[in-house]
Amino acid sequence: MYCDAMINKELVAASTEPLILSLLADGESYGYALIQEVKRLSGEKIQWTDGMLYPVLHRMEHRGLIKSRWGESETGRKRKYYSIKKDGKEAMVRHHEQWSLVHGVLSGLRKEQHV
Amino acid sequence: MFNLDQAILEWRRQMLAAGIKTPVPLDELETHLRDEIEQQAKSGVNEAEAFRVAVEKIGRANLVQNEFKKVEPKWADLEWKLTEVLLAVGSILAPLLMSHSVLFHRGSSAMTLSQKMASLAAFVTFALLVWAGRLSYRVFPVIPRKRIRNAISLASFALLGLWLQVLLRVILPRHDFTMSQVTLAFIWGWITPMGGWAGLFWGLETAARKKVPLASP
């Protein structure tokens, strides 16, 4: 069924951190919005388990890649906002380098096979 | 009749029972739950169903807790925090104490004014070297293995020890120094390099801790 089109679990796990960093590089955000954004950008093919995102965010905060603050939503609900830190930006650049390397190798190989 | 607040209260109880700590993670999860329910309600789903789906999407309490457990500070982290505090306080306090004893020392080995100034400069350099290591951790190589980092720190410390022997047994006896001159030579010759060593240690350890964002989660 829809499972074929979904990205597999390992790939989702490995891409979580670069995705979060890249999303936060565009500006402050919160857990629910991050999940929605990734779902939208991936055409619903990347779906994070909601509860699992928060431990990842906390771990990244603990490592000093991102920081958080409590704020208020438009409806007055208290909400935890995350933003990227300098170390996080550096980590993001390195992630991008590594992913493009893998991507480059893969597409190079595919071209070879089609010639 | 379905009562949302009651249902959320019950859900909080289950999460608590699984060990999710209050207030931070649980409050954050609750906000998420309410956002999700609100979103579903907008598309016409009734509250009870929206709640059921939202809870399911967050996942089982024990699974979420397992993930949170991985991020709780471990003993090694606390130990490192303590080391950092000691380094920070020590790098300021030690030069201050040494300056005090140099400035207010009386008796035959009391220093002249220029010797005092030279000593103070050495202490300032000491503190600067320690902090330079910490602040420039980005230029240090990342050595992920603790044992190799320990070996480097120990080896450089041993080298300093060797240098101290050379300084005290070989170099200084060849000069006809007064006591205050010996003290000054010792301060510049050994205390200041110690600052460099502490800076090296701090920088290496910080680099290994901060510069490894690519370690898998």
Image (tube, coloured by chain):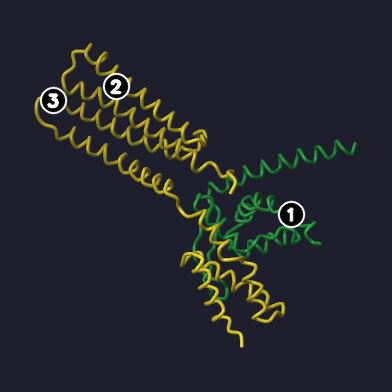
Chain colours: A green, B yellow
Residue A30 lies, in percent from the top left, at: 58, 63
> Position of B193 compared to B12: left or right?
left
Q: Percent x, y for residue B10?
A: 53, 77
Residue density around tag 2, few if under 14, some if 14–19, many if 20 or more, within 10 Å:
some
Residue toward you, A91 or B126: A91
Question: In the structure shown, which secondary structural element does the residue marked by tag 3 occupy?
Answer: loop
Q: What SS does tag 2 mark?
A: helix
Residue at mark 1: A7
Q: Is residue A19 left or right of residue B189?
A: right
* Chain letter, disc 2 residue: B
Mark 1 lies on a secondary structure that is loop
The residue shown at (39%, 26%) is B156
Q: Residue at x 37, y 34 (%)?
A: B198
Quadrant where the N terminus of chain B is found in the figure: bottom right
Residue pictured at 21% horizontal, 24% vertical:
B183
For label 2, the residue is B164
Number of labelled discs? 3
**Quarter of image, res A112:** top right
Viewer-side residue, B35 vs B150: B150
Question: Which amino acid does the dot numbered 1 rest on?
Answer: Ile
Name the mark on residue B109.
3
**In the figure, is residue A108 to the left or right of B69?**
right
Residue ID at (32%, 39%): B91
Residue that sits furthest to the right in the current view: A115
Please state which of the two labelled residues, at mark 1 or mark 3, is closer to the viewer: 1
Give the amino acid at mark 3: Ser
Could you give the CA–CA distance between mark 1 and mark 3, rounded to whole angstroms? 76 Å
Q: Is residue B2 above or below residue B158?
A: below
Q: Chain of mark 1?
A: A
Q: Residues within 10 Å of mark 3 (few under 14, many from 20)?
A: some
Examine the image and state in which quarter residue A5 appears.
bottom right
